[in-house]
Image (tube, grey):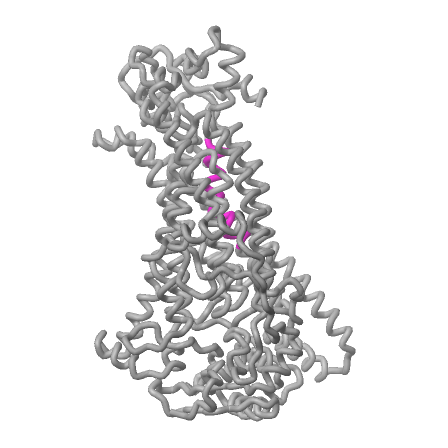
Amino acid sequence: MCPLGPVGNPSLISLAPNLSGSRAGPASASGHSCCSRNYTEVLFVLLCFCFQNKIPGVGFLKIHAPWNVLCREAEFMKLKMPTKKKYDVSTGSNVVEKINLFIHKVTAPLYPKVEENRVQTEKHLSYPFSREKQHLQFETFILVLVVYEIIKRTKCTKSKYTMGISSLLANGVYTSAYPLHDGNIEGVNVEPNDRKLLYEEWASYSIFYKYQPIGLIRKYFGEKVGLYFAWLGVYTQMLIPAAIVGVIVFLYGCATVDDNIPSMEICDERNNITMCPLCDRACSYWKLTEACGTARASHLFDNTATVFFSIFMALWATMFMEHWKRRQMRLNYIWDLTGFEDEENHPRAEYEFHVMQKNLKKEAASKVRSSQNQTLLTMMSKKAAYSDLLLCSLQIFVTFSIVFGVVLYRISIKTALHMSSTSTFRSNVRATVKTTAAVINLIIIIIMDEIYGVVARWLTVMEVPKTDKSFEERLIFKAFILKFANAFTPIVYLAFFRGRLIGRPGNYFYVIGSYRMEECAHAGCLMELCIQLCITMLGKQLIQNNLFEIGIPKLKKLIRRRKSKRDSKQEEEFHRTLASHEKDHFLNPYVGLNPEYMEMIIQFGMVTLFVASFPLAPLFALLNNVIEIRLDAKKFVTEFRRPIGARAKDIGIWYNLLRGLSKVAVIVNAFVISFTSDFIPRLVYQYVYSPDGTLHGFVNHTLSYFNVTDFQPNTDPLDPRQHVCCSYTVLYTSMKSLR
């Protein structure tokens, strides 16, 4: 093994050159040698460049930075570091301090056993500076950030249009660049380190009830990752009161279901009301009492308490946003980010390559001014933006088409089940159609989610944004629009469109020839909306988020073991003999926080937008997030390479998306109560039409009668039973106008 240099000077970044021969050619070799020479010129110490290691075809270049380089670059980056000790004089005990001390003792079991969670009365800038402990002056993520900033600015090739490690990675000179983890996390003789502490006090499912060590997370991964987990913790904490109120609303529906007058009238067999067929020819007449189960189940979610719960959730969303702003400002103060300014955005390697190509083409023909090149790039950027708008609209149209296809599936499968000779199928038509359609929607959503993620990235790459920040914001916006439409289009259809364009017996509305539009059950479409929300939310969280996040890394590890032709014991023995940089090479590359944020933003939409139809959504989100925090922690500590410690003072564009969703949620829930539930029709009947001021007679008031002799030819049922008339649900014409 090559020497690692002076004690206390940690290995900061490991670069894995591409030695496989697939992409690395003479240009790559010259780029590598030139890069090494330039790194030396900027006062780096290249301690070792090892080709002989236990991983065939891969070499490692370790980069260390001496103390004078760190100080110079920290000054250039305007980093604030502790220099002088501040003595804090205690003012004695009082009532408030005693109360705070008592609360701290009571809640002590909820805090992880790390230094950052001790009671602090002063900022960490008051910590002393000691020349004997210079290696402890910079935190690890600051060391990584400083080194990465240097190699990002260092000219590494002879071309005048390329700069830094980003260009080398894009050209295949190096395959990856990443910081090293602190050390091992398992073993008897493992030395204490921050990674091991995070694994024990954060990335464990057995301590799900404890707070997160946000200070240690920030120290190890940087402010950007620390802010994500701080936001996720605040969001999960705020879900506790929402989940409690949602459970109370659901229990209220369970307690009052036997006293609900409309459900009692539907379930009363003495009424003997015959309803019109739900489809042409194949469907038979049916009794209103067959909808008894659906009516009782709908009351669990469609009751008086649901309206107040919607108001509560609107206030909850606002309180959550304000609470996060307060928490964010507090972290900015503790982490000394109040005066932090966004760093200079360097051009992306892809943008530099794009500019180089344009300049080379123009220089070959004639000399042009840089302003003309900039104008050309601006025109190309506008053309790419128009293309993105067109393609995004096309993708949304594809989503609508898929939803329409599921609607046709509902109609056709319902007719087929009614024509079945098996009595079991005929008696469970509604439940079968609802459940299978919801599952099909879930499968399509999961598949299209992955496709839309690839499409969004491809569209953003086509635009060639100049900076990484611009690239990330455009990618997030496109992915959010496509994935949001993908997840919520089926739900919007069930909430606001299904059962609206059906016509009436004798004059039904048809699509694509003989496909008759589907109707809602007599108790409304709210129950089907609830089923769709439940299956989509649970399915996305359990399958797409948790199982994929757990299963895919395990599958990759299994495939790697198969390729190496070693069994589990041999693999463990081989892994034990590897050095730290070689172990990190086998970890998954860090892909950023966008997938984690996107997952939570979609869940936030599920919790707030249609909560009037599914009060248990906050409870399911809370249970998922308790697992999600530990799952993400385990990924960051054990399965991902260590990310570059990026600095940030907020969560960026995600806050704007959250604020927009919280505002739209108020309108959507108002529309659900007005147009999807029976809350307003019941109020109108009770206070306008009811003779005794109750809901007695409400069901009969919503029905109209149709003479069966007026059926259009070849649309009347094949049922041999003869009926003079049948009933069907009207759309409450006068009530709709009052809405």
Specify the principal SS of the magenta part: helix
Q: Residue 312: image x %, image y %?
A: 51, 35
Which residue is located at x 45 percent, y 83 percent? 16
**Pick the front one: 147 or 9:** 9
**Pick the front one: 443 or 40:** 40
Q: Residue furthest top?
A: 691
Q: Residue furthest front?
A: 92
Q: Residue 82: image x %, image y %?
A: 59, 73
- Confirm whether the magenta stretch covers residue 346: no
Where is residue 19, by image quadrant?
Answer: bottom left
The reply, left or right, for residue 529 in relation to residue 719 is right
- Confirm whether the magenta stretch covers residue 486: yes
Which residue is located at x 45 percent, y 53 percent? 104
Q: In which quarter of the image is the C terminus?
A: top right
Q: Residue 329: image x %, image y %?
A: 60, 56
The magenta-colored residue range is: 480-498
In the image, residue 163 sits, relative to residue 303, either above or below, namely: below
Q: Quadrant of the N terminus?
A: bottom left
Which residue is located at x 66 percent, y 85 percent? 160
Which residue is located at x 38 percent, y 19 percent? 260
